[in-house]
Amino acid sequence: MAPPPGPSHSDDDLDDVCYCCEHGVNMAVWQQQVFALDAKYNAHRAPNHPNFRTQYIRRRSQLLRECPRKEDSQFRRQYLKHRNQLLQQRYGISFSDQASLRSLNMSARSSSRVSESTESFRQLHGSEDGVSLSNFSRRPSVASGVVPTHQAEASRAIVGGNTIDENYAFVGVHHIFDQHKAAVTMCKFANNDRSRLCCVSNDGSVSLCDVTATPPKVDFILEGHKGPVTGCDWSISNDLLVTSSSDGTVRLWDVSLTNPKCLRTVSDPDNAQVLCCAFVPANSNMVVAGNGQGSLLVLNISTGIYPRPRSNGKIGGQILSVACEATGHLIWAGNNKGVIVSFIIDAGSGRLTKCRKLNIAENCAITCLSWRAWMSREARDPTILVNCAANVVCLFRVSDNNGTLQLRRKFAVRHKHQLLRSTFCPIMSFRQGACIVTGSEDSCVYFLDIEREGKACVNKLQGHACPVLGVSFNYDESLLATTDVQGLVIIWRRNDLNSMQGESN
């Protein structure tokens, strides 16, 4: 099969993929290993032809998916070794973390996942920079877990009897988007939707994608912001989209139309960058936005007015992240100084009342906040997930109606400089065990079981060649979207264990 047109690439061509097809080697994790290896060198491939680089890596992914399914572990090991040598010779560089590829060589039963102990995770991503987390709130959490127990048979029956490792065996690349020219800092699937994905980028544009079309496609590119787009949120009915930008504006888009359009542009009253935004769940006319002067502002998006007084939302620093609980009663805001503050909001007037303040780690940015409540009879604790640029992802229990946070657990993740994001898995309420997914500056995507003692990492996706910034599930967890600093958007599909077992039989 001929390679796509582009510069000459001699040893670094696609014939080796066809060679592996002849040997019938296509185990899911091996595909991911090969893809990850190529992705690491992709930035050095055809440096003057960025379009060819993306076309090349997409073609690699396609050919790997088309290989027949047949296990040959010895050949897989030899292929990876020789492929690595070819790439090193071709580009004259080697990566120190190639050992991480070999760590995925596991038994047939566990071939679709990677498990690491908490200690090994700390050794890999530990706080060698000396950042102290001693000022965390360390009040004891509730004795019981926050997820369904072993007795939750009815709840577990909803999602089948698979283990949590099997449920989150995301290994296959469904599609790769490359419509943006700069970092894609955030992505978000529409509410209760399998297909519609919004991506925002530092190139100043917003893209709306249909990830289940054949083939997946970019439906629209929304342009109008004059600076990097920093955040987005869908309205409850998915007919409106709000975006924020470092150009100091919030824009409201009507995305229910055949040709989406901008309905309103509102400038920040402090003439500052707007760094995050979210709809208030209890009132779709209200949007909360955090700006570069440390103010959390409430905007009536219908009138374009920021209700007064605005001083109630001042927390200092730069507000990089916000989260709202489902009723719209509580809002949390995190800044670049390592501070999280909770607010009570009057959904009618938009008035904010400051409640609780928590210092996570001094001068370590809070880059993402996510709220989630387990709506099951076995566990009802609302929880906040926090990305902190002190090389940690933290899980906090919301202990009262004022938004007080109590630390439940923290996980070591490579995170010091970028605006990383994480998310809860959507249908975790009905399973024993619960997962979160986070990006990382080591170019990997981590699935972490928040209830598992000792071995929190149940899967690790390798495919990006640079820090992974955004992560988002569609509502039924069939697809996961991840974005990176180079502007690549990868759509991962869930591994169909039943079909794989059928083929192997």
Image (cartoon, rainbow, N blue to C red):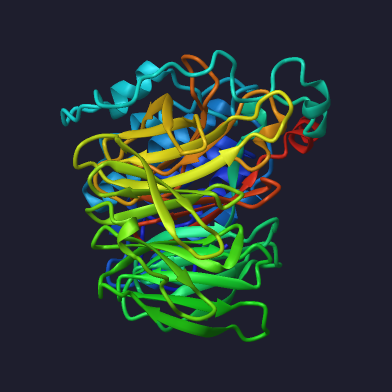
- In this view, the residue in front, 439 or 49, is 439
Position of 409 compared to 191: left or right? left
Position of 498 compared to 57: left or right? right
Q: Quick one: quadrant of the N terminus? A: bottom right
Residue 465 horizontal/vertical position (percent): 36, 50
Quarter-wise, where is residue 435 in the image?
Answer: top right
Residue under the point 42% across and 27% down: 406
Residue under the point 38% across and 41% down: 387
Residue under the point 28% across and 58% down: 44
- In this view, the residue in front, 468 or 387, is 387
Residue 301 horizontal/vertical position (percent): 51, 75
Residue 136 horizontal/vertical position (percent): 30, 26
Look at the image and tell me whether residue 424 can be seen: no
Vertically, is 140 above or below 195?
A: above
Vertically, is 101 above or below 314?
A: above
Q: Quick one: quadrant of the C terminus? A: top right
Look at the image and tell me whether residue 294 can be seen: yes
- In this view, the residue in front, 350 or 177, is 350
Residue 210 horizontal/vertical position (percent): 64, 67
